[in-house]
Image (spheres, helix red, strand yellow):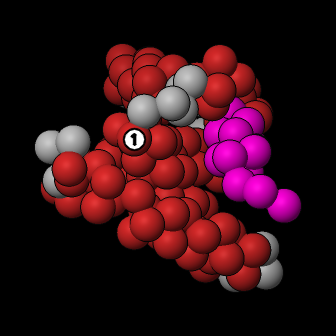
Amino acid sequence: MGCLKTFLRTTAVSLLCLAGTMSGAEAQSLETTEARLRAFSVCAGRLRAQTEHYWLFSDPASDQSTALLEQYEELIAAILPLAQADGLTGRDVLNWRVSARLSHRALLQQTRFGDAKVAIYAQDLSTRQIAGCRTLLLG
């Protein structure tokens, strides 16, 4: 049982490290259509996972995350035609969204079900990721 626990803990920490967060420099380097579309797609994926997490635990904050998600979906729809002219497809958007959603979902699961140290780190990282997405929106 000790080996399994160590393996699961290592896997959880690895997932947390892979989840990453958008740094200020990355947020400022959204000069290309592809970079903007990728950032919007990643944020949409994270917000979808956040919204589902709130629904799972009947958290009233789901309304706010749903509103943010809708804003990102509108941004993606607006910029996608420009991105398609550059050779990107809806499949690229879907890939970025699903990857971010799964990563953020794993992170949120650790906030509730991970051991204390991992849960604290996961909560901090999750909060920073969503805050990074909020900074990309006006208002």
User: Badge 1 local density, few (<14 within 10 Å), some, or many (20+)?
Assistant: some
Task: Give the percent coordinates (x, y) of residue 42.
Answer: 46, 47
- Callout 1 amino acid: Thr
- Residue of label 1: 33
Task: Give the percent coordinates (x, y) of residue 90.
Answer: 21, 59
Task: Give the percent coordinates (x, y) of residue 41.
Answer: 42, 52
Please say whether residue 109 is visible from this viewpoint: no
Q: Quadrant of residue 139?
A: bottom right
Please say whether residue 55 is visible from this viewpoint: yes
Task: Give the percent coordinates (x, y) of residue 12.
Answer: 47, 29
Residue at 47% in and 42% down: 36
Seen as rendered, the residue at the extreme right is 139
Quadrant where the N terminus lies?
Answer: top left
Residue at 68% in and 33% down: 125
Residue 22 magenta-drawn?
A: no
In this view of the protein, which residue sits in the foreground, 100 or 60?
100
Q: Main secondary structure of the magenta part?
A: helix
In this view of the protein, which residue sits in the foreground, 42 or 106?
42
Q: Is residue 98 above or below residue 72?
A: above
Name the secondary structure under disc 1.
Answer: helix
**Span of residues in magenta:** 125-139
Residue 137 magenta-drawn?
A: yes
